[in-house]
Amino acid sequence: MPGPKHLDPSSSPRALLGAELRVARERAGLTQAELAERLFVSGSFIGQLEAGTRRMRSDIARQIDEVLQTDGFFARNCGAVAKSKYPDHFAAAAEAEALAKTIREYAPLIIPGLLQTAAYARAICRAYQPTATEEVIEELVSNRLERAMLLGNPTTPMFWCVLDEAVLRREVGSPAIMAKALRRIMTLIRCNRVVTQVLPFKAGAHASMGGSLQLMHFEDAPPLVYAQGNGTGQLLDDPAEVARHSLTYDLLTANALSPRESLALIESAAEDYEHDEHA
């Protein structure tokens, strides 16, 4: 049987690499769990590599070559999936996000990237990098808007977000920018593209005081959790961790306003910004 072919980096290299991993594993007569045991990772991690929802790191690629005796194939080709337009701490999450069937997100401080307008994204990027050139900022904005194109599909992914009330109240950029940003969310809600709830200040302490949270489910791969802090992020696949963060999200939704009440609060906040704009 011929060995794996060399991958074309222009043709979905991560998906191709995952497919080749599955072929090589099955040729070796190993299950995902058995390969995972030899690599000291979880079986779900192998499943995510094969499904293309996780990026293959160079150290894992070398171990795979050794265990599956693939003559350095994966070490040579994993570089094709290493390039990303996103920061290192977010790159793997962004790639997984593009393949998710369902995304649930809690946003404590800013509008989620998938919902941002260009002006809002520009103000956020400038706040993060106050001395960056305009070219750098515009590239960041362009990348963020490209991510948002995921919602151009009328049904997939299903996106459900919980916005802390702070997201609505903290003015980013200007009253006009905030009003338009909130109006975009309202439009997506009213056309049934997203489900949105607001966690009001009066809810007090809650289950995700430590930061933002994103849960992703896939059609043919185990779920992932992305937990993000300031300039840091962790992509988690351990079933116990996924279950714990899923419970956290359930508790957030239980304490949040209903979608209808949330839409009314978002609209009220947008009107306040529009009033400030013309005052």
Image (cartoon, helix red, strand yellow):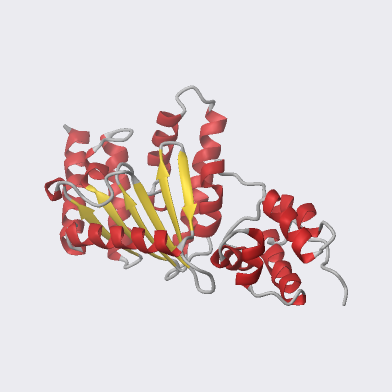
Q: Quick one: 213 or 193, which is closer to the camera?
A: 213
Residue at the spot x=25%, y=37% of the render?
Answer: 170
Pinpoint residue 12: horizontal percent, then vertical percent.
68, 61
Q: Quick one: 157 or 30, which is closer to the camera?
A: 30
Q: Quadrant of the N terminus?
A: bottom right
Left or right: 4 with respect to 174? right
Q: Is residue 49 above or below residue 183?
A: below
Q: Is residue 21 above or below residue 272?
A: below
The number of callouts visible is 0
Residue at the spot x=55%, y=38% of the render?
Answer: 139
In the current view of this chain or complex, which residue is farthest to the top? Answer: 131
Q: Quadrant of the C terminus?
A: top left
Left or right: 248 with respect to 68? left
Pinpoint residue 96: horizontal percent, then vertical percent.
53, 59
Res 21 → quadrant: bottom right
Q: Is residue 130 above or below residue 201?
A: above
Q: Is residue 271 above or below residue 20?
A: above
Pinpoint residue 130: horizontal percent, then vertical percent.
45, 24
In the current view of this chain or complex, which residue is farthest to the right? Answer: 2
Left or right: 19 with respect to 180? right
Pinpoint residue 207: horizontal percent, then vertical percent.
25, 52
